Image: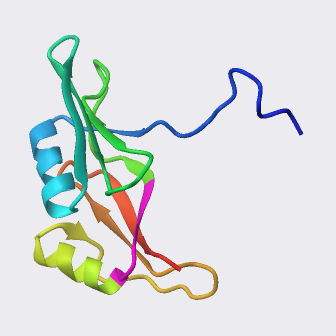
Amino acid sequence: MSDTTTTGTVRKVANVIIPVRDQDRALEFYCGTLGLDKRADQPFGGGYRWIEVAPAGAETPIALCPPPEGTDAGGRETGIALSTADIDACHARLKAAGADVDAEVSRMGGPVPPMFWFRDPEGNTLMFVEEA
């Protein structure tokens, strides 16, 4: 096992990035529909914006950024899982808000928590899992 106290080692996940074309629409969905907090919305080179959203108190934010030049945005499996204390209430709330959610909550049993997948307005896929 290597020494994890040396300079240059990974200390934490700084952020995860979801490439989006329409940052205003994405910001409305992630903050308005999902209820995440906006942590940053700053311009940076070339007329771009750096936007970060996160659940209250979370250490690692999600950055909603334009894709690199020549790269498509949307339609990605993000690998991002958000947690909720009540999966059924969360599913019902998002469905009522018109979000693109799975038809029902998946319950596989065992160590796998109840979960459902959902898509943002650009077709990026994330999931909600119920906290243990």
Inspect the magenta stretch and tell me whether residue 92 lies in it.
no
Residue sitting at the far top? 46
Q: Nearer the viewer, residue 70 or 55?
A: 55
Which quarter of the rendering shows the N terminus?
top right
The image shows residue 5 at horizontal and vertical percentages of 76, 31
Q: Is residue 65 above or below residue 120?
A: above
Does residue 16 appear to the left or right of 51 in the view shown? right
Q: Residue at x 21, y 66 (%)?
A: 100
Inspect the magenta stretch and tell me whether residue 82 lies in it.
yes
> Colour mode?
rainbow
Q: Quadrant of residue 25?
A: top left
Q: Residue at x 28, y 18 (%)?
A: 69
The image shows residue 74 at horizontal and vertical percentages of 27, 43
Magenta: predominant secondary structure element?
Answer: strand
Magenta extent: 80-87
The image shows residue 42 at horizontal and vertical percentages of 19, 26
Q: Quadrant of residue 94?
A: bottom left
Q: Residue at x 46, y 81 (%)?
A: 114
Q: Residue at x 44, y 45 (%)?
A: 60
Does residue 74 appear to the left or right of 6 in the view shown? left
Residue sitting at the far right? 1
* Figure disc tally: 0
Q: Nearer the viewer, residue 1 or 121?
A: 1
